[in-house]
Image (cartoon, rainbow, N blue to C red):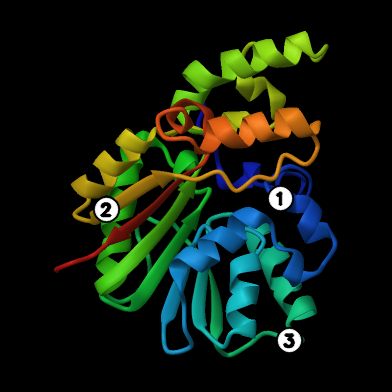
Amino acid sequence: MKVISPEDYDDEYYLSECNGYREFSLGDNSRAPRRLQVIWNIASLSPEMKLLDAGCGRGEILSKCIHENIFSVGVDYSKYALRIARNFLVRNCKGESESIRLIRGDLRRLPLANNLFDCVIMSDVIEHIHPKYILDVLVEIRRILRINGKLVVHTMPNLWYYRFGYPLFRLVELLRGNKLPQNPRDRYKFSHFHVNEQTPHSLNSILREAGFKTKVWLYDYRSYSEYPILMRLCMRFVTRAPLLNAIFCDDIFAVATKTHD
């Protein structure tokens, strides 16, 4: 398995490939990608709470926190991400707010006190953390959470979709005259960054091993507006219907709660 370094996560990745880059390029925080809107709603943050955005990337969640007057800390190990985030926050929030901090660091060793945060968000981060480090990261996240604090997770792909659903989708697309690669990862330039892809079961297991009380589910937030209406309706059905969604829904969400020290 190729070792990915912080230097690999550069401007090209964040500004031309990383999910949400089109909305980000518009410079309008109200147009955050639907994935981040769903995560924000799950987090249910309020002004008296403290948030850690673990793997903050371009800073969209942090920008939302400034507008909602929520104290937040963004951590990323990419200097490019932090520069993009800092510039975005200054531009979109009329200067850096005292309610926010940006830190370059390793999620295995956070320079933060015990029991500090009410909520931690890890959006599209777990799939980038090497399997031999993921438990250390989650234990560290649990350390800095307060009792009853929660970790909100989104990760994709769902490996069950890649193994079972994608071949069927590829066949349908072939019948429509669209030839997709046999390996779904070949559709993405930076797919090799995904070194720890999950299923709902594997994500639930590692969160529980780290000491969390867990709730893990599949949720399809996409509109499929780019497809004809019949195909759109079919895709919405198979990605949301019980049992079928296990192999056709590509997005895994989780809330992991720290119930005790």
Q: Are marks 1 and 2 in contact (CB under 8 Å)?
A: no
Q: Which residue is mark 3?
A: 95
Which residue is located at x 62 percent, y 75 percent?
64
Between 202 and 53, the one nearer to me in the picture: 202
Q: Which mark is residue 134?
A: none
The picture places residue 18, in percent across and down from the top left corner, at 68, 46
Secondary structure under tag 2 reads: strand
Looking at the image, tell me whether mark 2 or mark 3 is earlier in sequence order. 3
Nearest the camera: 15 or 11?
15
Q: Which residue occupies 82% across, 67% down?
A: 27
Residues at marks 3 and 1, CA–CA distance in whole angstroms? 22 Å
**Does 35 sit above or below residue 100?**
above
Percent across and percent down for residue 58 are 67, 61
Disc 2 + disc 3, Cβ < 8 Å = no
Question: Along the polypeptide, which appears first: circle 1 or circle 2?
Answer: 1
Q: Is residue 100 left or right of residue 229?
A: left
User: Residue 212 location in percent, x, y?
Assistant: 22, 56
Q: Which mark is residue 14?
A: 1
Residue under the point 31% across and 35% down = 201
Crowding at mark 1 (Cα within 10 Å: few <14, some 14-19, many 20+): some
Distance between the alpha carbons at the discs numbered 1 and 2: 30 Å
Examine the rendered structure and indicate whether residue 134 appears above or below residue 160. Answer: below
Residue 221 location (% of width, % of height): 60, 48
Q: Which residue is mark 2?
A: 214
Q: Is residue 172 left or right of residue 15?
A: left
Q: Is 176 displayed left or right of 73 in the figure?
A: right
Evaluate whether residue 247 shows in this view.
Answer: yes
Q: Residues within 10 Å of mark 2 (few under 14, many from 20)?
A: some
